[in-house]
Each structure stands twice: as C-alpha cells, then as structure tokens.
Amino acid sequence: MRNDHTREWSMLLALIAIWAFFALKEPVFLSARNLSLLSIELAVTATLALGMLLVLLPGQIDLSAGSGVGLTGAVAAVLVFWHGAPAPVALLVALVAAVIIWSLMGALVVIERVPAFIITLGGLLVFRGLHWLVIHNQTVPIVAGSDSNIYSQLTTWFLPAQAGYLLAAVVVATIVIISLRQRRSRQQLGLPVGDAEQWFMSLFISGQVVLLLVTVANGYRGVPMALVILAAIALLVHVVTIHTPFGRYLYAIGGNEDAAVVSGVPVRAVVIGAFALMGAIVALTGFMQTAYSGASTTTVGSLMELDAVAACVIGGTSLRGGRGTVIGVLFGAVMMTSLLNGMTLMAVSPEIKYIARGGVLALAVWLDLRISGQR
Amino acid sequence: MTPVLEARNVAKRFGGVVALRGVSFDLAAGEVHALCGENGAGKSTLIKLLGGVHPHGSYEGSIHVNGVEAAFRSTRDAEDAGIGVIHQELSLFPDMTIAENLLLGDLPCRRGLVDWIAVQRRASELLTSVGIALDPATRVGDLGIGQQQLVEITKALSRKPRILVLDEPTAALSQHEIDVLLTLVRGLKAQGVACVYISHKLNEVFALADRITVLRDGAAQVTVRAAESDANAIIAQMVGRRIEDFYPRRKSAPAGEVLTVRGLNVARATNKPIYLREIEFKVRAGEVLGIGGLMGAGRTELLLHLMGLWGRRLTGSVELDNKPVPQGGVRAAMEAGLAIVTEDRKRFGLVLGAGVAFNLTLSSLAELTRHGLIDASAEVRTASATATDLHIKMHTLESPVGTLSGGNQQKVVIGKALLTEPRVLLLDEPTRGIDVGAKLEVYELINRLTAAGKAIVLVSSELPELIGMSDRIIMMHEGRIGGSFERSQATREALLAAAMGRPSERAA
C-alpha cells in the first residue's frame, strides 16, 4: 500500500490541473468568498464520504445516504419550524432516529443476508418518499424569520479571526507531535521509517496548507463552523479506523470475511456498528446540507450518495472492501467538490453537470479496478 | 490387441513436488480398470493428464489412444479423442434444468433460436438410453446429490465416449444410487466402452473391475487381475513403505485430561440428517490426538463444530478442563481455551492483502487494547516476538501476508491461533501444500507446544504424518469413529481398514 505512490501523485496532479483550469477560466474561483463557500460544500460532501468509508471498508455500500440526508434535515426542520421545538432537541431527535434506522438496515444486511445494495436502494426510495411526506412537498425553513439557531449556525457561523489562527496553531502542533511520536516509536521498534527530509517536507507543507487555509478563510468571514465539524469527524473516523479493534475488524471483514469469522471477529456487531455510525453521519450531513440550503426542500440531498461513493473511490477506497483511508477520502472529496463548485461558477448547465459527475464516478471506479487488479 | 488408452512412463511435477514418477498404465476395450491409492498417491494427477487438464508438454512420457500418441492441448481435445471424464467436483449449473445442462454445449437451434422442444426430446432420449427415470425439465439444484451425479454421467455419455473415466463417482451416493451406477457401468462395459474407475471403496472396485492398479507416492506399485487378488492385498500395496524417521515426535508425559467430548451427534443444520454420530474422545495435556479418515469422513466438520463454526448439536457435550465449552460461536470457544488452524488458509485463515502483524494479532486484539485504543507498540512487540519465535520469514511486519511463501503463511495462521493462548490447539491439515522444511518446523512446533503442556488435535490425510506425530489416533468413517489406536498399535494397514469402515481389521 505504501511503496507505490503512482496513484497518489497522478491524483494530486489531476487536482492541480482542475484548480488551474477553473482559476484561469473563472478567476473568482480562487476568491476568498468562493473558497469559503467551497470549504462549506467540502465539509458536507466529505463528512458523508467519511461515513461511506466506514460502510465500504467491510465491503458494504449505502445508496440511501443522499435520501437520508434529505429526510433527517427535513425532520429537524419540521420539528423546529412547524412544531416550535427547540433546535437542539430537533437535531437530537433526528440524529437518534437515523442511528436506529441505519442499525436496522445493517442488521438486515448482516443477519438476514439481504445484500446492502438492495436494502439501501430500497432505503433510497423509501426515505425520499418519507422526506417529501414530512415536508408536504413544501419548502420548510430551518429557523423562523431572520433569527438564527444552532441549526442555521451550522453553516452560517464562522470562527473569529484570532480563534481561527489559534485553531491552526493547535492543529499544526498536534500533527507535528503525533507524527514525531509515531516516527520515534517506529524507529524504536525497528520498523522502517521514511526518509527524514521527505518527512520534514511533508510536515512543513501540511503546516503551510493549514495556515493558508485559515488565512484565506479569515480574508472572508473566518473559518466556517462546518469545516471545524468536518475536522472533528475526520479525526474521529481516523482514530476509529486505525487505532481501535472495531476499525481493525472493518478492514478484516472487507479483506476476507470468512477468515474474519474464523478468527473470532464479531462480524455482525461490527457491520451493524458501521451502519449505526453511518446513520449518525448521515444525520449530521443532513443538518449541514439543509442549513446550507436555508430550508428543507424536495431536492436536498439528491444524488449525494453518489458523490460520497465517488469521493471514497477517487481517494483509493476499494468497493470490494478492506482498503481505504481517511486522508484519501478527504482528498477525493476535495476533488469532487472542486469540480462541482467550479462548474457552477462557470454556469455549466445542469445537464452537463450530471454528465460530468457520472463520468468522473465511472472513471474513478474504472481506475480503481485497474489499479487493484494490478496488485 | 492394442490398448484403447495407454500411458507410457508418464511423470509430472508441480514446482519441486513430484506428483507422478514414471507411471505406465493401459486400458483394454470393454475393460474396467480400477485405480487405487491413498490421498495424494497421484490418482487425480494421472486422470488430469488423461483428460487433457494438464496439456501435452507439461509432463514427461507419452499418452497413446488406440496406439497413436495423443497430444491433448485441452480437455476439448481429449473429448474429441473419445475420452469422457467425470471429476469428483460436479460441473453442473444448479439453476438450469437437466435438459439445459445436458445439451448446454450443443443446443439444437432453428433459424438462430433455441428449439426448446428438440432440447426436451433429446434430453429425454439421453436419460432413457442411460436408464434414468428423471423429468428433463427438473431444475438440477432440486435433485439430490446422487441424482446430480447421474446427470453428470449422462452428460459425459452424451458425447458417446469410448473411454470413460470416473473419479470417485460414488463418494456422495446412497447405496441404491450406487447400485444404479454399478449397473450402468456394467452396461457400458457390455457395449464395449472402456472405463477407468477410481474409488476408495474396495468392495465396489472388486464388484466392477477386471484389473486393479495401485498407485503409491506417484508410482504404479502393481497391476493385478481382480479375480486373483483381494482387499487385504490391495491395502498392503497402497500402504507399502515403512514410516521413516521423518517425524520427530518427542513424546512428553501426558498429564490430566483437558478436552473431553462425549456422545456427540451433530447435524449439518436443523432438520438435516445426522452427520457426526456418537463422537467420543479425550485429549490430555501434552498429548497429540491424531484424527484420520478419508475425504468427507467428517474430520473438518468435527473441528469446526468444536469451535462453534459448523452444524447443530443434537446431543452430547464438549468439556474443557471439566467446564462445558459454550456453543455461542468462535469467540466463546476461544475464551474457553480452544483455537483452530483451518485447512484452507487462504480462504479461512488469512486476510491476504493485510500485513503480517495485522493477521497475527487479529484474534487477540482485546489483550492489546488500552482504553479502547490498540496499543500500537505493544502490538508490534507481540507480533514481532511471535514472528521470531515461529521463524516467519518476511520483509517487514507490515508486508502483505499474500506475498509470503505457503509455509510462512501457515506459520502466521498458527501464530494467530497461539496468541489467543489456547489450552487445546486444533490443527486441520497443518502441513498441506507447504514445503518439507516448513513441515519439519510445524512438527517441531507441535513438540514444543506439547512439552509446554498444550493439548493438540491433529487432523491429517497423510497416514505417515498421522502415525509419526500422534500419541493416539482415531480414524473416522462416514461421520463415526471407525477405530481408535494407541501409537504402538497404529499400523497403516489397520488405520486404512478403519478409515474404510472395515471394523474386522480394527483389532490388528
């Protein structure tokens, strides 16, 4: 996994080419305002994609994620706007409901052995229908009038400039300390470590990127709340996948389910757990996406499951399970979000956008098969 | 008269392993010639040469059909030369009808469309000609395994072969179905079709065969006329050589009983017939209990059942240190002190794409977890110690297991089981497909483990290994214990007789 960097480099080049293309065609692309919007869109797409990673790793898939985004956002919006529930209560209710529903889907997949593709395809349609029923095919705002609540602040609240810089400093310091400790302990245990110069450069560059990100964000309204949420989710999913037995089991099940069973891996509990986490992440994404739209409408969340799968696959996650990383998925999400945002700026018509989205998805899966076939 | 089929001095090797070393074999028209030998004696390899599975050029020696040398490049060539092979594994499509299966390669068509009426008619004709009363419109998956075997044979006969090769055709058949098959083969013989017949069941062999050839260690030992031989003589030939000093079993003083199995009756699933019957055995600490038997005797199923991975227990008990082993699944069995090394390591043993350390610690992550997080350095230390201890040769602990040699992969599977700190280790064919050096390492490891007071259950198809490494041996036959032996009384003849369900030999 580590010795062949061809894939990583070609993906990075492709991303730079995409950014250069949009920057030349539409200079607004690199404006602080657009980058700030882009980062909110990224937060939404990437959060869902990180949930998708948890489901793809054990070799499952969730096609209902996009509809779920619409439904959870709608439930919370209806509770707030029509029933006058306090926003935190509304969000909590929708979140808990999502966790329960996704756990049930996971149970159907792993206990009744109905393929996840079918269960979640059913979910896609059922949740879309429920979504429209819940909002009576209307537009339901997430907050009354021009007020704000915790729901709307998900995408309208920005960190003050100083807090942003402080956050950047904390993030960079954390990365450096963790990386340093890891390197030391690998050396002590006699495991191979990369070239020291390369390691320093990669740390230096990540530090620069974080700082640049905050500076650009502060040039508009500050670091968006949504981006902080994404960072927290990314850290969480990273720790879960790499540092917990649960995460280890996700890779083992996806790598060879029969061997996992014989090795005593609690396959059912792990897969249901992955779906439960996916439910929570779907709800969180639903809140952010609905907040970003300002209201729950019939189109919120539509096709987002495919963007999430595309982000995962572009980032090197295998659709057969057993392979994928948080960093890769974040990268894939940046790619998908940049494409969509850039095309919107260039006023590309919706029909062409659909075609481009589909093309990228198919291309990414084909590349994935080519590359995993070579292994 | 020229033999219809003849193999002259054929030899075949797979890498460093010699499967056949210069075997000569001939088949006369209208003759049934039986091939006998233990698992791994080279029967299946010989069949694959005759059937074109291993193409011309991949073996030494020559194959002649009606006196003319044949150079089969594929199974198709062999079929064209009139050789029909019925392999042990069925090659039918369960979701298609009998008719579709029979005529699949050659569907009758009219104007480019399949003529389904002609399909039914021809299938009926084929079934009638073989003497099988089945509706050709039946889905093959709805048939019993014995009937499927008959369909498979009908399919092979539909090409009108002059030579028919049957590789253990009765392994899965009931007595009635076996009778149908034997009658069928006799009928073919009367029509002048020559048959090569492979079976472990010597009573069938003597009921059918004109001549019998015994293979052992890839060489033909003897060819005899069936009328001039008997079962004991054939078994003696199959067993042959004495056991060399290849097996370095050092007996350790066995202590108290660790694993006690009583009156076990297990079915494949609810409402299925009983598969394992009245299984009883004990294993003491520091002891190796060998379990032998033919393929399908239920050895693997027994081990998997002990781990909670297979079957439904109807009666009986399994106790470890006088405490019942719960049936709640692998995790529960592991916590009780059992661990298993499965037969098919690629399918059931390893996550091939993941690293050595990942695989080694997969069953014992709980011990390496602090506050919900895996202690990475403890994991590396544990994995590293195990790899050193078992002499696992690898690039780094993170190298994908799939890149290791077979022997080293097997050591990873064993290491994973040992890290659960079992009291009893179940080994299912632990040396299959690994080289001699790695085999010896596995035997040494068994000695070390028993010296340290662990109990081992060793399932093996290789009699020398079983006799060489076990302190006591039980032989299984069709889901039952066919005989049990102390090491001192375990001769190959006695074991083989017990494996074949010939209890009269048990006392020998």
Image (cartoon, coloured by chain):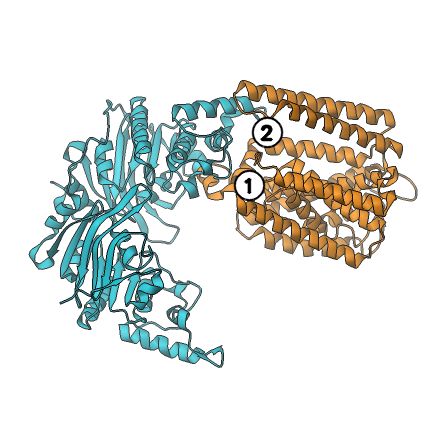
- Nearest to viewer (mark 2 / mark 1): 1
Depth check: give the residue in front, B407 or A88.
Answer: B407
Three-letter amino acid code of the residue under disc 1: Gly
Three-letter amino acid code of the residue under disc 2: His
- Where's the C terminus of chain B, which quadrant? top left
Residue B181 place in picture, x, y as percent: 24, 65
Q: Mark on residue A300?
A: none
Residue A165 place in picture, x, y as percent: 82, 25
Residue at figure coordinates x 23%, y 22% from the top left: B253
Q: Mark on residue A322?
A: 1
> In the displayed structure, would residue A45 be above or below residue A205?
below
Give SS at disc 1: loop
Give SS at disc 2: helix
> Which chain does the cyan colour mark?
B
Image-based side of A356 in relation to B395, left or right: right
Residue at figure coordinates x 44%, y 39% from the top left: A262
Q: In which quarter of the image is residue A57?
A: top right
Q: Quadrant of residue A148?
A: top right
- Dot 2, crowdedness within 10 Å: few (<14), some or many (≥20)? some
In whole angstroms, how far apart are the C-alphas of marks 2 and 1?
A: 16 Å
Compare marks 2 and 1 and give the one earlier in the sequence: 2
Residue B236 place in picture, x, y as percent: 13, 45
> In the displayed structure, would residue A64 be above or below residue B70?
above
Q: Mark on residue A243?
A: 2
Colour of chain A as rendered: orange
Q: Which chain carries label 2?
A: A
